[in-house]
Amino acid sequence: MRMHNPPHPGVFLKEEVIEPLKLTITTASRILGVTRPALSKLLNGRASLSPEMALRFEKAFGLKMDTLLRMQTSYDIAQARKAANKIKVERYAARA
């Protein structure tokens, strides 16, 4: 069943991993081997979760990369559906 408003995976990671471990964004970025601005954008929902970043979270914190990427896809689908009425495309009908 499809979620109508799934959370951004970055917000999930912030609330379910970073905050419970009492990590700062600076410390978490060092653990993950990424820049602080890149991690901050992700955790605040301003950047998408890349496969590479998902793999870094898997290696560092044991979260499955596949699950995290499915979360990103679900989020992206929900955002596209919200904007569907702005996309003007007519259904294609093949000519006989």
Image (cartoon, helix red, strand yellow):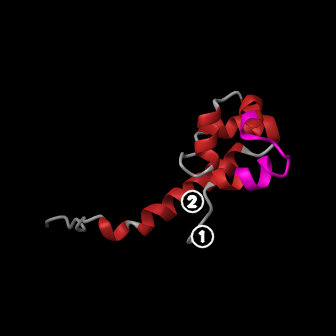
Residue 4 versus residue 19 in the image, above or below: below
Q: What secondary structure is marked by label 2?
A: helix
Circle 2 packing at 10 Å, graded few (<14), some (14-19), many (20+), is: many
x, y (%) of residue 84?
A: 37, 67
Res 5 seen here: yes
User: Which residue is under mark 1?
Assistant: 3
Which of the two residues, 42 or 26, is positioned nearer the viewer here? Answer: 26
Q: What secondary structure is marked by label 1?
A: loop
x, y (%) of residue 60?
A: 79, 35
Say left or right for 83 vs 68. Answer: left
Q: Which residue: 71% across, 50% down?
A: 13
What is the three-letter code of the residue carrying label 2?
A: Ser
Q: Which residue: 47% across, 62% down?
A: 79
Which of the two residues, 77 or 7, is positioned nearer the viewer here? Answer: 7
Q: Over which residues does the magenta segment extend?
A: 13-26
Alpha carbon distance from label 2 to label 1: 8 Å
Quarter that holds the C terminus: bottom left
x, y (%) of residue 8?
A: 60, 56
Q: Which residue: 63% across, 55% down?
A: 71
Res 52 seen here: no
Q: Which mark is residue 32?
A: none
Say left or right for 59 vs 1. Answer: right
Residue 35 versus residue 93 in the image, above or below: above
Q: Which residue: 49% across, 60% down?
A: 77
Q: Is residue 7 magenta?
A: no
Q: Is residue 17 magenta?
A: yes
Residue 86 versus residue 36 in the image, above or below: below
User: Which residue is under mark 2?
Assistant: 74
What is the three-letter code of the residue carrying label 1?
A: Met
Verify CB contact (< 8 Å) between mark 2 and mark 1. yes
x, y (%) of residue 90?
A: 22, 67
Which of the two residues, 91 or 19, is positioned nearer the viewer here? Answer: 19
